[in-house]
Image (cartoon, grey):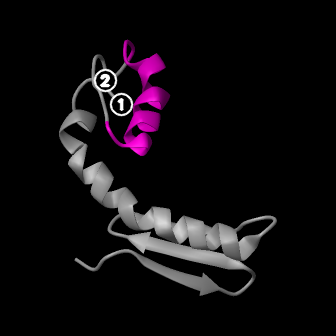
Amino acid sequence: MQGAVAKRLSGGRLHLQHGPIDLIVTADGEREAAFDAAERRFRAILGELVSELPGLRRPITGTDFHSPVARRMADAVRPHHDHAFI
């Protein structure tokens, strides 16, 4: 599998792709600084989520995550865990 790819697009956009993650983003303000920060952070996201997969696949109650993205994902579904498996 190819690693994370970042490419500047026309119209002041940034394309970020890695595995199943495929994003086209824009930024207000200091665009280059924002894009540089986004590229740096993006390179680690998929690996972090893969390491959290066993916990992400379990019912959310009592699951403790290390990755900030996995924690945010858990926080987003936690209010709904009594009603359905998400």
**Residue 26 coordinates in the image, percent (x, y):** 70, 68
**Residue 46 coordinates in the image, percent (x, y):** 33, 59
Q: Amino acid at mark 1?
A: Ile
Question: Is 34 one of the magenta-colored residues?
Answer: no
- Mark 2 vs 1: CB contact within 8 A: yes
In the shown orientation, is residue 1 left or right of residue 37? left
Could you tell me which residue is drawn at 28 percent across and 17 percent down? 62
Residue found at the very far left of the displayed protein: 54
**Residue 37 coordinates in the image, percent (x, y):** 58, 66
Q: Amino acid at mark 2?
A: Ile
What is the number of the mark on residue 86? Answer: 1
Quarter of image, res 17? bottom left
Give the magenta-colored segment's residue range. 66-83
Query: Can you say whether 31 is above or below 9 in the image?
Result: above
- Dominant secondary structure of the magenta stretch? helix
Query: Can you say whether 63 is above or below 49 in the image?
Result: above
Sequence order check, earlier mark of 2 and 1: 2
The residue pinned by badge 2 equals: 60
Could you tell me which residue is drawn at 66 percent across and 67 percent down? 34
Question: Is 67 one of the magenta-colored residues?
Answer: yes
**Residue 28 coordinates in the image, percent (x, y):** 79, 64
Quarter of image, res 64? top left
